[in-house]
Image (cartoon, rainbow, N blue to C red):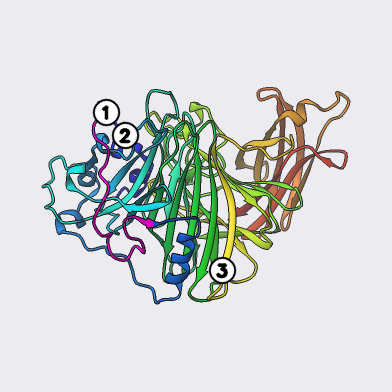
């Protein structure tokens, strides 16, 4: 089962350059049950919040997942046979800057998602028809109202005469996007609950979306979403701006049905199979295979941290306590083909995703969960913000943030960044050598008589042979050192370049495990 491939490839239901035909037909009959809206109903900024609040006051009922066996039992290749007719795209031929295509239910996506168009302050349901889709070799369904699994948004991202796929909402509360010149990689989610818990994770779902019809010559589009799950309901408003960076302004309101301690806000989901510092037991011709290579953080104390990702032998959970963090993200920093050597997957084109917090997030921690995987098709990395205080039932919690889908995201200063982490056998038995490369404007701007020094610390074991030297191959500096862990099973390490007492680089933080 290749769920990762299904989420990753925009070519699943490919667009072709077809002549402009009729636009998607909007429903004029009653909306499907359970969605909380009827055709032509008044819609404003408070509508979805009111629906979420009302939903949270009632016992949870799972969305409809009933499908004919011909759709419910599809495999990956069969599901790919179902292609949306691009000529039926919402707003096709209207001279608007965005278009929307729809996903059919089936395979891993049986849940029905209600879709609405909002225009002139009123919401109308988008009516399902099997005629919207080409089913390839599969039998065409009858005239039943099977509904949709999700949608994707297209806009002239890479060139003005073609509507590229910009983002997609498909599966539970997952969504993903690309910036100019990129291909799909990691995903974001609306909400994470009990991630990494031995009792199992809860996956809330987006049950309904309201798509605001964009105005001509605008650069943004607004999507509203109603989230629901056993523990909570929620309302989301996404303002989406494609470009060199594709930016989502996210306004969320969460309404717990029960007290929730294990909440994950602004959750990110990615894949790390192996890289230069973490490839034990992997026999592969490629130097690296990952959608993201590190977790980047900018703390409330203006400290910048970089944690290289690993594919651990056992489940690994790390927490980084903070108060009012500036942001965090899963980053893909290596942008050269030579770092991956994969002509098909093109990992160098995968987006980084930076979460910029808006307002005070309070006290809490960034959580990083690394799950062992033996195959690159699995999303095994999760990161999110968890408040220190639990979310109480029958309350409202607002969390606003901005998502930057980008190549890289540098905080508001010019500290040098870590561009590579490597590890190998040390000079003595049972020691490990670590080599870290730093590059950035801060190092280039140092006076000639100032040479940075390396500060390396470990909570256990012993650090030896610390060396800081120029690396003219990257126009930066290299730090190397050896770790003698002794009998320890895990060692937490930290390394940073300093000029005197002042930091000139972000801090490298790493967990060595036996």
Cα–Cα span, label 2 and label 3 = 38 Å
Q: Which mark's residue is nearer the viewer, 1 or 3? A: 1
Give the vertical position of 95 relative to 66 (above or below). Answer: above
Q: Left or right: 449 with respect to 419?
A: right
Label 3, secondary structure: give it. Answer: loop
Sequence-wise, the earlier of marks 1 and 3 is 1
- Estimate how packed mark 2 is, as few (under 14), some (14 to 19) or many (20 or more) residues with alpha carbons within 10 Å: many
Q: 485 or 119: which is nearer to us? A: 119
| Residue that appears at 48% across and 27% down | 337
Cα–Cα span, label 1 and label 2 = 7 Å
Give the vertical position of 268 relative to 503 (above or below). Answer: below
Prevalent SS, magenta region = loop
Label 2, secondary structure: give it. Answer: loop
Which residue corresponds to mark 1? 20
| Image coordinates for residue 411, horizontal then vertical, percent | 69, 40
Which residue corresponds to mark 2? 92
Q: Which mark's residue is nearer the viewer, 2 or 3? A: 2
Give the vertical position of 200 relative to 314 (above or below). Answer: below
Q: Left or right: 75 with respect to 118?
A: left
């Amino acid at each position: 089962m290749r769920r990762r491939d299904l989420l990753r490839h925009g070519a699943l239901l490919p667009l072709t350059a077809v002549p402009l035909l009729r636009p998607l037909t909007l429903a004029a009959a009653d909306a499907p049950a359970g969605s909380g809206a009827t055709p032509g109903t008044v819609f404003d900024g408070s509508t979805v919040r009111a629906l979420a609040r009302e939903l949270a006051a009632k016992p949870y009922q799972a969305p409809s997942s009933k499908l004919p066996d011909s759709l419910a039992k599809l495999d990956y290749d069969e599901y790919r046979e179902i292609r949306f007719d691009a000529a039926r795209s919402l707003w096709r031929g209207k001279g608007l800057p965005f278009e929307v295509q729809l996903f059919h239910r089936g395979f891993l996506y049986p849940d029905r998602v209600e879709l609405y168009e909002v225009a002139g302050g009123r919401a109308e349901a988008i009516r399902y028809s099997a005629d919207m889709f080409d089913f390839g070799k599969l039998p065409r369904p009858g005239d039943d109202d099977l509904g949709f699994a999700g949608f994707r948004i297209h806009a002239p991202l890479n060139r003005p005469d073609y509507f590229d796929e910009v983002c997609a909402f498909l599966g539970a509360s997952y969504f993903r996007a690309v910036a100019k010149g990129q291909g799909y990689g990691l995903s974001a989610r609306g909400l994470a609950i009990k991630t990494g818990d031995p009792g199992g994770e809860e996956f809330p779902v987006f049950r309904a979306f309201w798509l605001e019809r964009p105005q001509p010559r605008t650069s943004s589009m607004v999507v509203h979403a109603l989230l629901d799950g056993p523990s909570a309901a929620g309302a989301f408003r996404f303002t989406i701006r494609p470009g060199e960076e594709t930016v989502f302004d996210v306004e969320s309101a969460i309404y717990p049905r029960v007290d929730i301690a294990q909440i994950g806000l602004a959750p990110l989901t990615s894949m790390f199979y192996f890289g230069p510092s973490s490839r034990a037991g992997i026999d592969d011709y490629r130097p690296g295979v990952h959608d993201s290579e590190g977790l980047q953080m900018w703390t409330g104390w203006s400290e910048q941290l970089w944690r290289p990702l690993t594919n651990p032998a056992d489940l690994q959970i790390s927490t980084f306590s903070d108060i009012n963090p500036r942001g965090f993200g899963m980053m893909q920093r290596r942008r050269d083909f030579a770092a991956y050597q994969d002509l098909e997957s093109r990992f160098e084109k995968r987006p980084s995703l930076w979460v910029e917090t808006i307002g005070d997030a309070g006290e809490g921690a960034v959580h990083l969960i690394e799950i062992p995987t033996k195959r690159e098709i699995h999303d095994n990395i999760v990161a999110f913000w968890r408040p220190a205080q639990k979310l109480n039932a029958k309350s409202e919690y607002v969390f606003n943030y901005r998502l930057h889908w980008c190549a890289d995201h540098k905080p508001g200063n010019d500290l040098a960044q870590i561009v590579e982490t490597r590890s190998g056998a040390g000079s003595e038995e049972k020691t490990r050598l670590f080599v870290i490369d730093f590059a950035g404007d801060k190092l280039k701007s140092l006076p000639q008589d100032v040479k940075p020094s390396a500060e390396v610390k470990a909570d256990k074991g012993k650090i030896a042979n610390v060396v800081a030297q120029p690396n003219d191959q990257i126009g930066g500096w290299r730090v190397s050192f050896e770790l003698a862990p002794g009998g320890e099973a895990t060692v937490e390490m930290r390394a940073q370049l300093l000029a005197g007492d002042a930091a000139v680089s972000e801090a490298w933080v790493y967990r060595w495990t036996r």
